[in-house]
Amino acid sequence: MVDPSGPPLASLRERKKAQTRRLLIDAAVDLCLVQGYENTTVEQISAAVEVSPRTFSRYFASKDAVFIAVVDDLAAEITDELNAQQTGCGPLEALRSAHMAVLGRVARRPLAGLTAERIMLILRVIYSSGALRQAAIEYRSPPAMAALARHMGVDVDDRRLDLAVALFSTTIVSACHDAIAGDPEATYGPDYVMERLEQALSDVARFTAELDVP
């Protein structure tokens, strides 16, 4: 008989799934930092968590997806922030404001699947691989795209929406390019991302202001 005073079975199952997902991400990061992204396999990640590659595939479609999962966690928080914003500002400002709000909260305390340490480690791995950097630039979150489309007053398939997101994604990836610096003691957490993003967006604003277009 189920103890009515205990937690619901579904809740326990979801917690177990979330724990396994977190352990797989942590194992992937640890292995890649030690032996490099290209030398790390799905089998090694699975073995580190004592699950089968088949179980791994239930959580992630590929090795790349393990690292993009942290971007998914961030994108979910960004989407909530975009939905809470008043419309009226431009798309880049909406994205900048949302990222600053979420990263600021993560810097103060863990948030969902995000921690300052995890962001730091993931940055180091992503910037060690050209394929992962490109995947980060090309990443699109459908809920975040829908929220930004609402800000812009356009459809989700509008080319201007894709242009705005492509510009912002390229900017933030470029802003944090030295996260692969040789100093293993350096900190590349939320504060680092916020500082570099502000600098990069200031450069973008200056560059666009200098455009001589009719």
Image: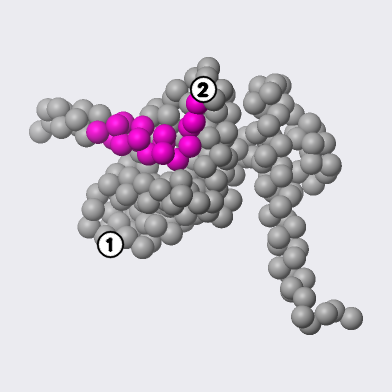
Pointer 2 or 1: first along the chain: 1
Tell me the quarter of the picture where residue 207 sits.
top left
For the C terminus, give its image quadrant.
top left
Residue 18 in the figure: left or right of residue 121: right
Number of numbered labels in the structure image = 2
Q: Do the residues labelled 2 and 1 touch (CB within 8 Å)?
A: no
Q: Is residue 20 above or below residue 53?
A: below
Residue at (79% x, 31% y) in the render: 44
The type of residue carrying mark 1 is Gln
Q: Position of residue 1 (x, y in %)?
A: 89, 81
Residue at (49% x, 40% y) in the render: 139
Q: What residue would you read off at disc 2?
A: 180
The span from disc 2 to disc 1 (Cα, nearest Å) is 36 Å
Tell me the quarter of the picture where residue 169 sits.
top left
Q: Where is residue 40 in the image (x, y as percent from the top left)?
A: 72, 26
Q: In this view, does 203 lie above or below 53?
A: above
Q: Residue 181 carries which label?
A: none
Residue segment shown in magenta: 186-202
Q: Mark 1 falls on what kind of element?
A: loop
Q: How crowded is mark 1: few (under 14 residues within 10 Å), some or many (20 or more)?
A: few
Q: Is residue 33 above or below residue 205?
A: above
Q: What residue would you read off at disc 1?
A: 86
Tell me the quarter of the picture where residue 154 sits.
bottom left
Q: Is residue 127 magenta?
A: no
Q: How crowded is mark 2: few (under 14 residues within 10 Å), some or many (20 or more)?
A: some
Q: Which of 107 and 213 is in front in this view?
A: 107
